[in-house]
Image: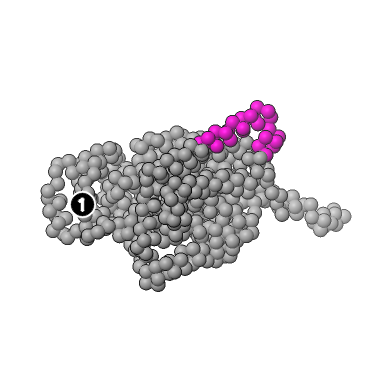
Amino acid sequence: MEPQRSSPITASLSDSLSPPAALAARVGWLVVALVIASGAVGGVHRALHGRPDWGDLQNEARYVWEHHASARGTAMFGYLPATSFALWPFMVWPPVWLGATLYVGSNVLATVLSIWIVSRWWLPREAPSGSFAWPALLVCANFQHALQANQLTLWTLLLCVAGLTLIGRRRALVGGLVLGLAMVIKVMPVLLVGYLLLRRCWRALIGVALAVIVFDLVPSVWFFGWQGALDEHRAWVRRARWHSNLHLIEEPLLRVHRHGTNASYAAVLTRWLRATPPATRQVILYGEPPADVVERYRASLAADECLTLDPMPPRTGAWAEKRVDIAWVPRFHVADWPAWSVRLLWVVTLAGGLGVLAWFTWRSGALAEDDWAPAAALWMLAVFWPSPMMRHYYLAWAFPAVAVVWGALRAGGPRHRLRWRAGECLAVAGLAAWGIGVACLGWRVVRWYGVHLGVLVVLMAATAWAWRCAAARRCNHATTERAACPAVQQRGAAGDV
């Protein structure tokens, strides 16, 4: 059994650090704490004033509680019913001031627990944990953004790292249950089912299935009834199709007035390879307007207007109109391809990248205690790519990968120093790229054209190198243990005779 790593939050001052390094670690943790605290204060302030995302989540959760159905034009279009159930204790039942305080407090707790779990179980045993403040410092701005926005990102981060840790430490059924809860609260981590399949984690997959039943299906049937639960999940599938990657490629300005910071792979690829209409005003028709109405609006467009059809219906009526300002939208593009060609490129590149990751994961065999963490961190990065929505605060999910790369650097490299130095440079480049991405979080044009996707590519390469280092260390440990085995020593002695 691998000895447990002492928590770096408590061991950072005693883990063989020199006095200057220990002082720097103290300062680093202080900065992390202040940044997280500022996010918590901002989150409570925004919630008390009904600002996003608290305002939208609260309105939709209350609507479900009062009407026993999701609103037709729900702002939570990508969420399963389980998410509303999870929000009721914070956004429906208590007064706003108490609910906001409890909700933001739960996000702070999720952040602290995520840091603790990753620092304790996701680093190689050879890595000194004394200065773990630095990977936390690199990602604390992302934590702050998620806290301030009152997002569900940090709940999902905690459930993912906790579930993957339990699975990696041979608590597969419980780990799968926790990981499945993450998937029903926010659907994006469902890609991790592929990771479990490829690493033959069958008990974990049973846990994921149980989570879907226990946390989503059973409460849905209890609250909505059999037919209501079926209708809710059908509506979720329909909304997912309306706002899928393929639809975003077809309609580049779809919901841009609400999700202008969306930097998903499909959205960014479209911005580079399709021309944005040269308009400063957007006319949006929601729902299903008759064909003659659409043609009438199209014929009456002014020179500075463009028309966008959004399938999401309004709260009341079959269709509705909205006009918004889009003068801020960047117009640069390198080509003006038809939608089908951008779709083809998106499918081929996405399938190719995920296929390579799947092949290497399958080749790595069943789950091993020494290399599960970098593999899991790499798959958590892969979650970003197929999603039609990638907001800047989602980047907090990259924290395990940043920590794993840092841990591989601190653990030292294999015997071939030349090969190690090349990988070490890649790891440093990954952490440096992440730092550049953090510095650009407030730069809308940079997010619009996908600089953070480029950061994720470099970080994924560095995480893959950390995975390779972990596999090499596992082989070295196995060789050392075989050499130390008495039976092997006796055979060796007999051979010498």
What amino acid does circle 1 point to? Glu
Residue found farthest to the front = 95
SS type, badge 1: strand
133 up-or-down from 293: above or below: above
Q: Which residues are magenta?
A: 11-35
Give yes or no for residue 18 being in the magenta stretch: yes
| Front residue of 293 and 466 | 293
Give yes or no for residue 435 being in the magenta stretch: no
Q: How many residues crowd around disc 1 within 10 Å: few (fewer than 14), some, or many (20 or more)?
A: some
User: In this image, 337 relative to 420: left or right?
Assistant: left
- Residue 365 seen in this snapshot: no
User: What residue sits right under mark 1 in the picture?
Assistant: 321
In the rendering, at what x and y percent does residue 236 appear? Answer: 36, 61
Residue drawn at (56%, 56%), measured in percent from left and top?
163
Q: Which quadrant would the C terminus be assigned to in this image?
A: bottom right
Residue found farthest to the bottom = 226
User: In this image, 370 relative to 244: left or right?
Assistant: right
Residue drawn at (37%, 69%), measured in percent from left and top?
228
Residue drawn at (61%, 41%), measured in percent from left and top?
407
Dividing the picture into quadrants, the one containing residue 77 is: bottom left
Q: Which quadrant would the N terminus be assigned to in this image?
A: bottom right
Dividing the picture into quadrants, the one containing residue 247 is: bottom left
Residue found farthest to the top = 20
In the rendering, at what x and y percent does residue 390 appear? Answer: 40, 47
**Which secondary structure type mostly characterizes the magenta part of the structure?**
helix
